[in-house]
Amino acid sequence: MCGNMKKSTLLLNNINLRPSQIHKFRGFVGNAFKEHDLIHNHDEKGNPIYRYPLIQFKLIEKTPAIIAVTDRAVKIFAELFMKLDRVVIEDIVIPVFEKDLKVEEVEFGYSDEIFMYEFASPWIGLNQKNFKKYNEAGNDEKNEILKKIMTGNILSMAKHLDCWLSRDQKIKIDHKLKEIKVNLKGKSMTAFNGIFKTNFCLPDYLGLGKSVSRGFGAVKVMI
């Protein structure tokens, strides 16, 4: 087990957004706080910074939420987001009347226990390269491809969050996933809903896979 990690969750209780508006919500906040690249993940020239996003935008049971992980991101987050008194989406100004900020220590890392999770939002695991291979595979092979991709997603997230596994610590995955179609940047893509089991402790609503800062791939532990 890598131990504890700081996590904060800001819920904007009086605002209703659709899942398709989360990227606009993120865009508005990123523009409002341009000086902090942890929010928008772009450098001064506008080029993307490739890393696991430490600040992510979600819908949690239909309520817009912003999640930050690690001491550094939580500190920036607490200073800035209490200043957030309005959100502008598609030229509509939405005042923020009610903000609920929760800061907590959460467990994160390899475990001897097995945890069961559900995807609270669709998981985009496939890229152009592995989509072709996945599409041409039989059912058993498809399951194995998704296991490998999910293992890679968890290892990549762990590495970016300074959690390193020893050689004898192997991630196990079992899943029951269903294909769905989602729109990402105007393109239709194959994504997945469903449940999975793994011996890695993941904090609620952190994302796996592609476009996690826009709300995709959010996991929630099943008790």
Image (cartoon, rainbow, N blue to C red):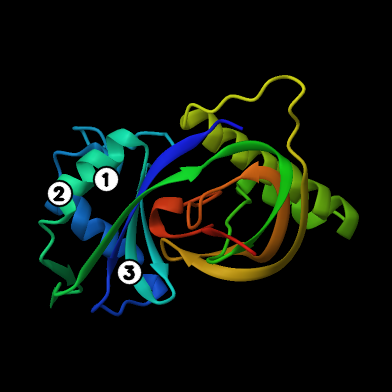
Say which label, 3 or 1, has the lower sequence index.
1
Q: In this view, does 124 lie above or below 107?
A: below
Say which residue label 1 marks. 39
Label 3 Cα neighbours within 10 Å, binned few <14 / some 14-19 / many ≥20? many
Any part of residue 146 in sight = yes
199 relative to 203 in the view: left or right: right
Residue 223: x, y in percent? 65, 64
In this view, the residue in front, 62 or 30, is 62
Q: In this view, does 70 lie above or below 144?
A: above
Q: Are marks 3 and 1 in contact (CB under 8 Å)?
A: no
Label 2 Cα neighbours within 10 Å, binned few <14 / some 14-19 / many ≥20? few
In this view, the residue in front, 5 or 22, is 5
Q: Are marks 1 and 2 in contact (CB under 8 Å)?
A: yes
Label 1 Cα neighbours within 10 Å, binned few <14 / some 14-19 / many ≥20? many
In this view, the residue in front, 178 or 110, is 110
Q: Which of marks 1 and 2 is in front?
A: 2
Residue type at numbered disc 3: Pro
Say which label, 1 or 2, has the lower sequence index.
1
35 relative to 182 in the view: left or right: left
Residue type at numbered disc 2: Leu
Residue 121: x, y in percent? 53, 66
Say which residue label 2 marks. 80
Residue placed at 19% from the left, 39% from the top? 36
Say which label, 2 or 3, has the lower sequence index.
3
Q: In which quarter of the image is residue 37?
A: top left
Residue type at numbered disc 1: Ile
